[in-house]
Amino acid sequence: MSAAFIVDAVRTPRARKKGRFAKIHPVDLFTYPLNEIVRRHNVDPSWVEDVLVGCVTQVGEQGWCVGRAAVLAAGWPFTVPATTINRLCGSGQQAVNFAAASIQAGQYNLVVAGGLEHMTRVPMFSDAGGEESLMLKHYHPDLVQQGLAAEILAQEFTVTREEADNFGYLSQVHAKRAHLEGRFKKSIVPIPYKDDSGNDHVLWHDDNPRHDASFETLQSLKPVFKEDGVITAGNASAIVDGAATVLLASEKALSEHNLKPRARIVSQAVVGSPPRIMLTGPIEASKQALSKANLLPHQIDVWEVNEAFAPVPLVAARALRIDQMKMNINGGGISLGHPLGATGAMLIGMAIDELERSQKRYALVTMCIGLGMGIATVLERV
């Protein structure tokens, strides 16, 4: 089996909903990281054999194969194909995993993968309707939407409101430190935008984190999904706009195009998990990815467990015995935001950045996924 390497990972800043990216079409937003990742490494776009784009809400401006539209909008040769992938919240990570698997199978040598979600212009649940299936209701009558699933998770695994709020607060603290220390600068491509008055600006950093957040403020927020519940706006992921790309290559492509890899894809896994509770997938997916890599949890130096809701990483950390000093140490979905289809690709880039900053070896990225699934990827710094 061939090895699959990550040459680089590039992303836009995460922008608050109805904020700085509101006037940018989703296709146009994706062209920025798409063009930046090849520009940085003097890659002729015609060398890219495929572009795989994760996107959850594939309707309206994100319909009509948004991946292919972005390749054409970026000015790339029409000979470069593209596709759009939907594994719900795991879409961007799945795009990277599919690209890696194709390289490992010897079918591709140079691929761009990534993700996109413009949650301002294409709101979450714009594609709703599948849940009305009578057969789905027949086999899974207790299926609920994710917010209530997070409440079930918290109840069944005894995650308290205080624990969830403390985790949400730490996410803000970690994101603030990462911003002040410039930990994301290597991966972010600045995005030009216009304000409501038509004036030109550039966004070069994530604008969602609340740097003035306090534990007391989070404690004062009301539950969103259940009157006496645990989940609030302060311990759940934020709605933001963003896009990300990852350049993957085989050993042959590295040599032919004089590319230097930053990381190697060691293993990957995707699993189904109980749909009622929906959010336990990262546990089994991580176990399978670790087993394939012949690694144990304590050997992972950097953990990125998507912060869809605070109970998700808290429960995963308990089950996998993760040292929380290694988990989400630069913030996550709660503070930075969770642009659905883009998040997985962003987390892979964050993990590689942190491996390099800390001079560590292994990272594991994992996400919970709607309807009960989980995805995981193990990376090795090279």
Image (cartoon, grey):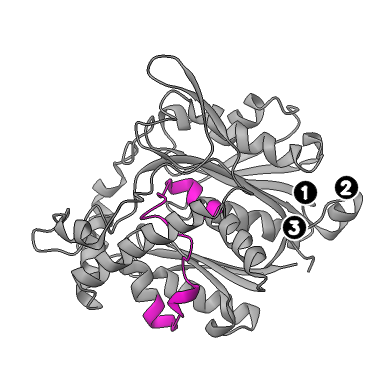
- Give the class, few, some or many, for how many residues have Cα within 10 Å of label 1's Cα (few <14, many ≥20): many
- The image's mark for residue 173 is none
Mark 3 residue type: Ile
Q: Label 3 belongs to which residue?
A: 103
- Give the class, few, some or many, for how many residues have Cα within 10 Å of label 2's Cα (few <14, many ≥20): some
- Can you give x and y, in whole percent of width and height, for residue 15 in the image? 43, 38
Q: Label 1 belongs to which residue?
A: 110
Q: Are marks 1 and 2 in contact (CB under 8 Å)?
A: yes
Left or right: 273 in relation to 356:
left
Q: Is residue 168 above or below residue 238?
A: below
Q: Is residue 220 above or below residue 281?
A: above
- Give the class, few, some or many, for how many residues have Cα within 10 Å of label 3's Cα (few <14, many ≥20): many
Q: Label 2 belongs to which residue?
A: 257
Left or right: 236 in relation to 90:
left
Callout 1 secondary element: strand
Magenta part of the chain: 317-346
